[in-house]
Structure formats: structure tokens, C-alpha cells
Amino acid sequence: MMKRNRFYIIMAFILVAFFLICIANNELAYAAIKKGDTLGGLKKQRDALIAEQKKQNAQKARTKAEIEASKTKKLQAENELFQTKEDIQKLEENIAATNVQITSEKEKTNDLLRLYQQLQSENVYLSYITGASSMTDLIMRMDAINQFADYNERELNKLEMLQESNNSLNKELEKYQTKLDSQIKSYADSIVVLNDNLEELEEGEVTIAQEIASIKELIKYYESIPCRDDQDLIECVEIANNTGWLKPVTKGRITSGFGGRNRPTPTASSNHKGIDIGVSEGTPVYPTAAGQVAAIVRKSSCGGNMLYIWTNVNGKPYTYVYMHLKSIEVSVGEKVAVTDIVAYSGGRFYGYDRCTTGPHLHYGLSEGHHFGAPGDLALSKFNAYVIEPPGYPKVGGYFSGRS
């Protein structure tokens, strides 16, 4: 009888200990989904993201309008510059023609001076006088020379004044041309800055659109469980526990390691938050540990198609991600086993994925369950707890088999 009671007492202790261990593991598993995070909270976050997206769209419209205004001003300045250059060219032609006239008038003046010098000679003067038919003729001849000299001097003065005016106007036009050049450069620089701002807004818009799409999928999943708006999310989900990690593909080569690296593309990060596994496009991709699909991002500008999965390994919560996928074969909320094909690898995406140079699979691992609670959808949250995936060879090394 005493032995039987002792047996029951021991069994009771074992059951209680097992129960406490289960509770502890459950608390660890949902450490990222805190008490008080509800489906209603997810919906509020969705609405906030949609409102932010509207603001971004409005700012994008304003930026586009500013770009068009700057383009119009730049075009006007270019047209004015073109006209100014034509005016400068015509003015330079006029200046050149005036220079010819001035040279001609100066030659005439020189001829007159030479004539005066000849007249100062007694013989020439007498010859000139004797050549006159009368005194009146002589006076008229002398007066004609004087009038011509005066006229020539006046014309020369006019030409020199015109030349001075043309030179002054030419300087003003050159100054205006410099001003227009400066304006055109300023408008061009403004357009570059505005286009950069627009690119950031459009990229941000894509990001926020992806977050909205992901949170809508989460809401749809929690509603299908079903989960009430006021119910804690931790009460609505259950993640399986694993005892270790497997490889996501049956064989591959490590082409880029975790942490610091040379940037493979201008837009890729030099602090690599995962590893790259070289595989051919269309290679089946499996879960590294059984779990539940947390989020899906499609056609990200840097990452392409991305799949996030929650899991628990040895009682600790993790989220892992696959990037640059050709296709995704699961949906948000779906339970996945290690033998399931969840995606097919990609890596060659023309147009939207700027952070890949060829076929490969990016595998990233982070501590905690992310993308599953209000305020926990941003990629920065995942990156804050990222760790190096265990059990892989160094860069350049191959592995075969999933264990």
C-alpha cells in the first residue's frame, strides 16, 4: 500500500513538472506576441498604414507637380538662352561689320591727312591753285575738302559710338547668358533632387503597400481561425516545437556569408543579414524547421518574393526568411512540415529585384516571432534580432543533404 501511494506521488510530481515545462515552452514560443496584442490591434495598424500610404501618395503627387514645374522653367530658360545666343551672334556680326566700316573711314581720314600734307607743299598748293579756274573755284575746292573732312570725322564718331554701344550690349548679353546657364543648372539640379525624392517616395510606397498586403493576409488568417477582435493573438495560434535545424535545399554552395561582405550590387547591404546559397533557378525550397507561415512579401524592390516562417526550436521562438524566390507555394497562417515544398528558388528578376546578380536562395534567421503582432511588421524588427544560421560551411563551401 505504501509503495503504491509512493508511486502515485512520484507520477503526480512528473505530471506537474511536465505541465510546468509545457507552460514555460509555450511562453517562450510566443514571447514576440505579447499579452494584449489583439486582432483589433492588427486592424488598427492596417488602418494607420493605409492612412500613411494616402499621405505618401499625396506627397508623391506634389513632388511630381514640382518636377513638371521645374522642367517647364528649365525649358523656358533654355529657350531664352537659345535666343540670347542668337542675339549675341547677330551682335557679334554687327560689331565685325562696324569694325570694317570704322577701318574704311579711318583709311579715308588718313587719305585726307595725306592730302593736307601734300597741300602744305608749296608746289602742290600752287598747282592746286593754278588748277582752279577762278578764285571762287579755289574757295569751293578748299571748302569741299574741309566739308568732307568734317563729315568723315562725324561718321567716324558715330561708328565709334555704335561700336561702344554694341560692345556694352554684348557684355550685358554675355552676363545674361551666364545667368541663364546658372538658372538651367539650378533647375536641372532641382529636378535631380526631386526625382530622387520621388524615387524614395515610390519605394516607400511599395514597402508600405507590402506591409498593408501582409497585415491583410494576417487579419484574414486570424479571422479564419477564427479569432475575435478583442482576443489575444497568443490564444489563437499554436507553433510546433522542433529539436534541431535542417537545410532548406538538398545541396548547395555558400556564395555569400553572414555579416560584413563586399556589396554584390550597389543597392545591396554590406552587412549581410543571412547567407546566400547558390542553387539553380527553380530548386525546391523546404522549411528548415516545422512551423507556420508568418508573412509573405511579393516583388520587393530589394529581396523579390520573400517568405517568413515562425518556428520553435528547443523551446525557443524563431522567424526565418527566404528571399529571391521564383514562386511561393504556401499562404499566410498555413502550417508547414519539414518535408513540404514551400517555394522554388529564383534570383533572376528583371525590373523589380535590384539586390540580386544571379540565381540563389537567401536564408535569414532571427530570434523571436516577428510579423505576428501589432507594431511588429517592419523588417527592421526582424533585422534587430538576426543571427547567423548554424551548421553551414564557410563561403565557397558546399553541402549535400539537408541534415
Image: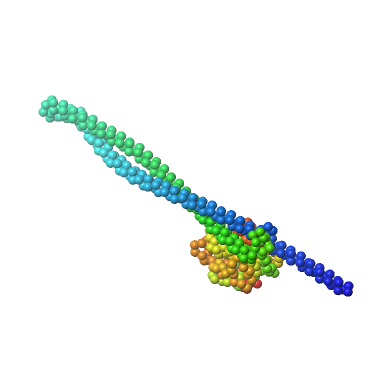
Q: How many marks?
A: 0
Farthest-out residue, top: 135
Farthest-out residue, right: 2
What is the x, y in percent for residue 146? Answer: 21, 29
Q: What residue lies at 53% left-to-right and 63% top-to-bottom?
A: 299
Q: Which of 109 and 368 is in front in this view?
A: 368
Residue 191 shown left or right of residue 321 in the figure: left
Farthest-out residue, left: 133
Residue 365 shown left or right of residue 299 in the figure: right
Q: Which of 96 and 314 is in front in this view?
A: 314
Q: Nearer the viewer, residue 68 or 97?
A: 68
Q: Which of 2 and 141 is in front in this view?
A: 2
Quadrant assignment, res 276: bottom right
Quadrant assignment, res 174: top left
Residue 345 shown left or right of residue 38 in the figure: left
What is the x, y in percent for residue 45? Answer: 60, 56
What is the x, y in percent for residue 145? Answer: 19, 30
Q: How has the structure been colored for display?
A: rainbow
Above/below status of 78 relative to 363: above
Q: What residue lies at 66% left-to-right and 65% top-to-bottom?
A: 237
Quadrant assignment, res 89: top left
Above/below status of 182 relative to 386: above
Mark yes or no: residue 58 visible.
yes
Q: What residue lies at 88% left-to-right and 74% top-to-bottom?
A: 1
Q: What residue lies at 53% left-to-right and 64% top-to-bottom?
A: 357
What is the x, y in percent for residue 236? Answer: 67, 64
Quarter of the figure with the C terminus: bottom right
Mark yes or no: residue 294 visible.
no
